[in-house]
Image (tube, rainbow, N blue to C red):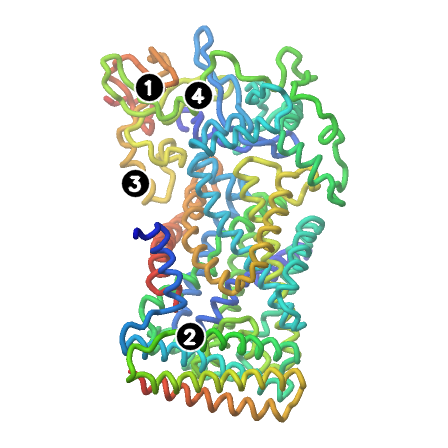
Amino acid sequence: MSDGHLDLVLRVLDHQIVGPRRELVGKVDDLELSWTADAFVVTGLVVGPGGLSQRLPGRLGAWVGAVWRRLSTGSEPQPVVVPTTQVTDLGSPVELTEAAVEALQRSFGLERWLRRYVVGRIPGAKGGDHDEALDSGDGPATPTMSRADLTEPPVRPPAPGAQWLSALLGAPVLDEDGHRLGDLIELHTGIGNERWTLTHLQVTHSPLGTELGYHADPHQGPALLRRAFRHLQRHDVLVPVGEITEIRTEPARVVVTRSGARRHPHHDATAPRPG
Amino acid sequence: MKKFFAIALGILTAIGGFVDIGDLVANGLVGARFGMSLAWVVLVGIVGICVFAEMSGRVAAVSGRATFDLIRERLGPRVGLLNLAASMAVTLLTYTAEIGGVALALELATSVNPYLWIPVVGAAVWLVLWRVRFSVLENAFGLAGLALIVFAVALWQLGPDWSALWESASRPSLPDGESRAVYFYYAIALFGAAMTPYEVFFFSSGGVEEGWTAKDLGTMRANVFIGFPLGGLLSLAIAATAAVTFFPQSIEVDTLGQLGLPVGLALGKLGIAFLLLGFFAATFGAACETGLSVGYSIAQYFGWQWGKFVEPLRAARFHTVVLLSTIVGVGVLLTTVDPIMLTEYSIVFSAVALPLTYFPILVVANDRTYMGDHANGRLANTLGTIYLFIVGVAAVAAIPLMVLTRAGQ
Amino acid sequence: MRAPRWAPAACVVLAGCVAPAVDTGAYQHNAVGALESAVSTARVAALALDARVHDRITLAYADTVVTESEEALDPIAASFAVVDPPGRDVDPLRGTVLDLLSEAGDLLADARIAVRREDVGAMGDLADQLRDVADDMEQQAETLP
């Protein structure tokens, strides 16, 4: 991360989500990406089985999805998206605001069902102080207004027209002549205030083990694995988001402009090399 | 002074908690059948579990993330789920074997049929996981498990020919009538018993339960580098008593009662009392650890609230998984399957599943974004890479050897 | 008839229980296996009896170990008895082995009763007899190739 960026797949996707008091409230099961007037940005974290089921293969995914729908309260359950404005810290876990955590906890059908019908019925389930709001109230998973942010609810359904990161990962990346650059494995964003704005796509010929981190840190050990992955990923290139001419899902496909100067992600931004 | 006691307590519980039904069965069986000629495997296993546990403990302390958190993060949901399924199957098998082990220990104390004990033991284990505080659970069973030191005392009392023992341990040779395939099959079983994956799930999740931070690294390392090797020595003492008593008479050990006979011969009923306490504490403690580990792993994969540091109602999914695993374990045992046979399979499959958890931990322990200055140094990485090979070879060889030797017959 | 798909797996599992004895060599191998297991079982029971005679272990402990031994010997004898001898030439071997196994089985049953009655004299005698029969079985196993 010498050139100041964040690897979305490595650092955000599939990470633990915590609340202000370190409560564990799920995983970043997917990321919602949207185009604004002038930028490609991460607008939300998809949390819960509604998002996860779409990333699991075949029948298993369908089954997880079916259980989730059965245990959801609304008539047409929608995957839960937490707007990125609710993220307060981005470390090893992703930390959310109190309001988002409360809204998420209300959306967990399985947890609420088990609390009500299984665990809550066993003597001794409650110990110490506990929050009545957690097990009372059976209302639908409608977002409540956050005290901190009255303009946007702490959780919402997926935005229309947005794309999900997992649907793009592995997409073939072509240039305008139809020449294949490789597969999309990673998205870079800026840091600080720009941490949700996408800057580059990372493209590889070898999608093996891309969440392990060797594509991001050129010095990560142990030496044997570093060399092996470096060899596999030696043809990786970064494509600036500005060069995207088309990006779509079903089937996933990315088309970018032709360019002579694309750099390997391990190389310093000041020393580009021919792709 | 307080800190000193905390460290001493940690070391003692690490020693007492090291041995479980898998170590008992594997070391007794191997000692009786192969003498000390497989002692080197125990040493390889001890170094391996130290390397592995230190890495996962360090990651847990520095990043606050336990093992399956990282597996999901680094392998993604699909491969992570495969990994979860395999690790869960092995841990559940081990959990079942431990519950069976407690029942066998109680049978030795009471001569009441173990199948009558099994439901009682299952209920007791669940109750402990439901109600008892984490630190109490860990310390009580770890300290009581120290009673297994009777094996070392018994060995000394039996007055073996130490130089012959040393000779057979330091120059391993194949005993008469044993094939090379069987020898290596038991080598893998012994290795799997020393490096069971649940130990690492439990160790790292326990670190998060107890709120370790980078400041606790010293204590964690003392537990690992002093406690585990001493626990491993206890395993060797078990193997040695069996080697001294049974190997010359070509007796094969396949029950807990047989395994403990040398203690009775050497130390009498007082020794038996300690032995039974040790058997009980080691298996009951390990049953708690494996039961929790099943819940930890699934909850960490999905990001659910887990742990005994919150009231059960706040971790309903976690506690439901623990409850269901207990029911499954008891149910399997009540089909009158032999717990010792389950144990033998569980340690071999542990060896098969080991790389699935070992590899991601090795990678994350090198991630400097998380670990900063606490990332793996040269020594940890050299040993880590060597063990990546050892663990890989053992995993690949285990099933073919199992088929070839008809599970070691 | 086509073999079902699980047949190979079932063969692997069953091979552990009933090894088909196709020739004399394999039959003798079976006999050695049965004898060795029985030697181990008889000697461990003898150890437990000795320990109980000298009051080194509790009644419950001795009872458990001896009962386990008795229960372990039954399937050893049964799985040897069910194998058809490949020819008449091994009939004497079959007879000798089955006699030895049944002698050991009887002694183990007596041992269990002696332990539960806390009959110290009988336990000592039975320990000696179990050791003798174990030695006989070991010798018999050594005569086989």
Residue A56 left/right relative to A231 = right
User: Which label lies toward us, 2 or 4?
Assistant: 2
Task: Name the residue that disc number 3 marks.
Answer: A227
- On whether disc 1 and disc 3 are found on a single subunit, the reply is yes
Q: Which circle's residue, 1 or 3, is located before the other in the chain?
A: 3
Q: Distance between the Cα atoms at labels 4 and 3?
A: 26 Å
**Amino acid type of the residue tagged 1 in the rendering:** Val
**Amino acid type of the residue tagged 4 in the rendering:** Thr
Where does the image place residue A85, in percent across and percent down from the top left?
57, 18
User: Which label lies toward us, 2 or 1?
Assistant: 2
Where does the image place residue A42, in percent across and percent down from the top left?
48, 18
The crowd level at tag 3 (other Cα within 10 Å; few <14, some 14-19, many 20+) is: some
Element assignment for label 2: helix
Task: Name the residue that disc number 1 marks.
Answer: A239
Element assignment for label 3: helix
Quadrant location of the C terminus of chain B in the rendered image:
bottom left
Mark carried by residue B33: 2
Looking at this rendering, what residue extends furthest in the top direction? A37
Q: Which circle's residue, 1 or 4, is located before the other in the chain?
A: 4
Where does the image place residue A120, in percent across and percent down from the top left?
72, 39
- Closer to us: B215 or B264: B264
Q: Distance between the Cα atoms at labels 3 and 2?
A: 43 Å
Q: Is residue A195 above or below residue B326?
A: above
- Closer to us: A245 or C33: C33
Where does the image place residue A43, in percent across and percent down from the top left?
51, 17
